[in-house]
Image (cartoon, rainbow, N blue to C red):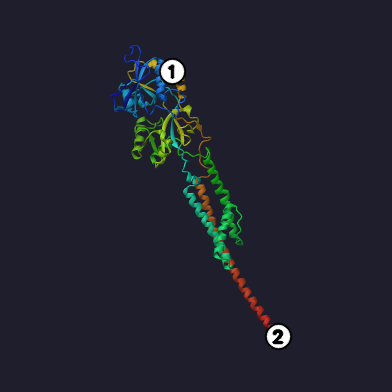
Amino acid sequence: MEFVSTWNVSIRIIQMGTNSSNVFHSPTVPHLILGIDSVINNRGSQFSVNTRQKGLEKEQCATLMESLGWTYEFVDYHNNIGYVDENGTAVGLLGDIYHGRIDMACGRFRMTTERLKFLTFAYPINFSVRQVYLIRDPGKKQDMSFMLMPFSTHLWILLGITIVTITLALLLIRYVEFVDNGESLKKTTSSAVYHMISFSTNFTIEAKPLPSYVTFWAVVTLWMVVWSHVIIAYYTSELRGMLIVSSKKKVPFSDFDGFVKNLREGTYRFLAPSHEWRPQCPGDRTENACVELFDRIFARNPPVIAAISQLSNDSFIRKQPIPLVSVQWYDDSRIGGKYAVWTHLTFKSDVWVIKDFYVSPAAFIVASNFSYLHELNSGIIRILPAFKKIETHYTPTYPKAILTETPKTSAFTFTQLSSIFYVHGTIMFLSFLILIGEIIYDRIHRGKMERVEVTTIALSTFVTGFRHKLKTR
């Protein structure tokens, strides 16, 4: 039996439950109208039992009704959980509960202080509920840029400047010493480049003769130390850490304050299944203050409205100019560590989970005039183990793998790594000053030697001529 409801635009279809096939219901058997929203009815990514896939929350609610022997029918809402506020505004699924249009809302609704003012909750079905943040792996880049990832753009520029500087230094040293001695400019240039390649790759390339200046060997030694023992070691260790799930994974934030900061600065954009979807704040903030906080943030940086499962959609993510973050609330037992990665069929390992503070317990919501609350609570307590078993029928979007260690920064900070290049540049400048001194000294020494040679030759010529004259006499 199906018909369109005229209660609220958010209600689409009323589907009769399996125990309500008869039009007339026994007056002694409760008949409940149950509300369920598509946002909170988790269908999972895989159904592991050979029955109709109803959705986790809907199946648990139906099982509860059947265990109590009550008849029921579902009212399906489509992405319209709604809300009730202190101004008397009551819309959507929660609004219909508040006005008594339906008897119970099926789903894990958080028992917040503000909701308790207007709504009636049944016995909690989840006591240890955590707020978690879902983000894409910030280390995932396009394949073509993977080899560039260990260094930032700033560091690549510094490295390029350093390589060019070293090459020019070697070229200058060879030019000063060998061009004047008859070596061609082409030979000098190729020898300098060969030296640079051999010193950077440990290849043996013949480029003789070698310069005799002390500065040449100082520059070469400095470059080999910086390149081989610092730059290459750092680069390879960072790249190795990116190839595996290890302690070198970095997260952009780790708690609520960092989450809010990233949203406020626009570093991350909030992903929500509806405009009413709001994160919960820690206990030191009232719900109204929390709503105002995120209203201000979303007024400046509007959320992206889409299903949270879109985080696993690569084509959807590529269209987003700003990284996305979403919020969910899950039982603490589902997430064993502070940081976790999705590993089931839907999310693979590209989506991370950051576990934060405990939130209110979760429970079904009933109408304020519900007459069978005691019986309902007794049935929930009795059937809680069955709820756990029902969860195994699905592959819900819960983390299964945990990072081996808390993600942390590299052993080198950005400032430390930059300072390596700056110190190297300073030493290179001092080396150039020494080189200039060596060149000046060499030229002066060479000039003195040339004058001595000229004097010696002239004196030798004079003596030889004088002796010749003596012999002829």
Marks 2 and 1, how far apart at CA? 136 Å
Horizontally, residue 441 falls left or right of residue 390, namely right
Comparing 95 with 284, the one in front is 95
Q: Quadrant of residue 274?
A: top left
Horizontally, residue 42 falls left or right of residue 404, namely left
Q: Which mark is residue 249?
A: none
Q: Residues within 10 Å of mark 2 (few under 14, many from 20)?
A: few
Question: Where does the C terminus fall, quadrant-wise?
Answer: bottom right
Task: Identify which residue is drawn at 49% across, 50% down.
Answer: 156
Kind of residue at badge 2: Leu
**Residue 296 at x, y = what percent?**
34, 37
Task: Identify which residue is drawn at 64% across, 76% down.
Answer: 457
**Residue 358 at x, y = what percent?**
44, 29
Comparing 215 with 56, the one in front is 56
- Give the secondary structure at mark 2: helix
Dot 2 or dot 1: first in sequence order is 1
Question: Where does the N terminus fall, quadrant-wise?
Answer: top left
**Residue 112 at x, y = what percent?**
38, 26
Residue picked out by circle 2: 470
User: Looking at the image, can residue 362 be seen?
Assistant: no
Residue picked out by circle 1: 381
Task: State the residue lying farthest toward the bottom.
Answer: 473
